[in-house]
């Protein structure tokens, strides 16, 4: 597989005013957000994550196209997001268009922007949002301080009292690689599994972005380096580049979806054609 190199001159540099995002201290949505994370941090245990992999990993629940899945996102508002309160489908196009403006030659990267949150359809299939949305983190080892709300929300998680799961390495070996780590269950891992199961041809860098874009305790908080290997360190700049668009393209300006759909349908046909198994 061809390895793409990031050109630093193309990096998306948000205006300073955009740093108001991810405000977990005050604002009109904070109470809703903290409740979602409290439930997540109490219930996301190693056993729970293994159960969800067994439940959803076979991608045998339904079939539909990417555009069909995207249309379902019209009815989903992410309860963990402190920044916006509008349907996730608009965020998908905002992210994709932000990437398209800066990386016009990397159509697969643009498609990643459109696809990255589609795993949230789990929340429309009877799953509670606390096991679908929000920042992800490893299970089976000690929960680190780089996790949002970690100082108050893990106290009732039974894994914090487990003699192995509560240690720094837990069930893992040093520098085992994130691909060998069980993350809290959510839309990242689910969508990655869907793309792999359906043999979509998005490059490895793009699949990595989708799988770990919510792992803020790592790519932004600087935690969990003891689990990362050389590949993770090589992929980190890609995840960080994607994160700039995921985060800083959130505005109240709603994109004209009807105008954009034909372009993105072409990318879907190129990389994820037809009807997929979910």
Image (tube, rainbow, N blue to C red):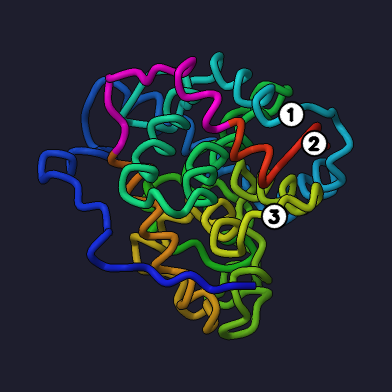
Residue wearing tag 2: 276
Identify the element where label 3 is drawn: loop
In magenta, the rendered stretch is 249-264
Relative image position of residue 217 (x, y in whole percent): 41, 59
Residue 275 x, y percent position in the rendering = 81, 32
x%, y% of residue 156? Answer: 55, 46
Query: Residue at 68% of width from left, 38% of height from top?
Result: 269
Q: Farthest residue toward the left?
A: 16
Q: Are marks 2 and 1 in contact (CB under 8 Å)?
A: yes
Q: Which mark is residue 65?
A: 1
Front in this rendered view, residue 203 or 171: 203
Figure quadrant of the N terminus: bottom right
At x 53%, y 46%, the residue is 112
Dot 3 corresponds to which residue? 201
The disc label shown at residue 140, or none: none
Q: Seen in the image, is 182 located left or right of residue 134?
A: right
């Amino acid at each position: 597989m061809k390895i793409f190199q990031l050109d630093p001159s193309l990096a998306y540099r948000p205006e300073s005013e955009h740093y108001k995002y991810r405000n977990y201290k005050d604002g009109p949505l904070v109470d809703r957000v903290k409740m979602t994370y409290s439930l997540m941090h109490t219930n996301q245990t190693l056993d729970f994550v293994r159960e969800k992999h067994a439940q959803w990993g076979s991608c045998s629940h339904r079939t539909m196209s990417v555009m069909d899945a995207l249309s379902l996102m019209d009815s989903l508002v992410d309860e963990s997001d402190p920044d916006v309160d509008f349907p996730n489908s608009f965020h998908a196009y905002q992210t994709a268009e932000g990437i398209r403006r800066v990386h016009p030659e990397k159509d697969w990267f643009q498609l990643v922007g459109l696809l990255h949150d589609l795993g949230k359809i789990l929340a429309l299939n009877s799953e509670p949002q606390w096991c679908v949305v929000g920042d992800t983190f490893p299970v089976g080892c000690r929960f680190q301080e780089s996790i949002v709300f970690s100082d108050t929300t893990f106290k009732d998680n039974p894994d914090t009292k487990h003699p192995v799961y509560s240690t720094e390495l837990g069930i893992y070996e040093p520098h085992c690689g994130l691909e060998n780590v069980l993350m809290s269950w959510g839309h990242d891992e689910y969508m990655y599994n869907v793309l792999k199961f359906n043999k979509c041809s998005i490059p490895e860098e793009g699949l990595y972005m989708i799988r770990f874009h919510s792992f803020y305790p790592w790519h932004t908080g600087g935690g969990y380096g003891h689990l990362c290997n050389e590949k993770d360190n090589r992929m980190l700049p890609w995840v960080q580049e994607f994160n700039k668009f995921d985060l800083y393209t959130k505005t109240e300006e709603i994109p004209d979806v009807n105008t954009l759909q034909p372009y993105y349908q072409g990318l879907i046909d190129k990389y994820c054609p037809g009807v997929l198994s979910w």
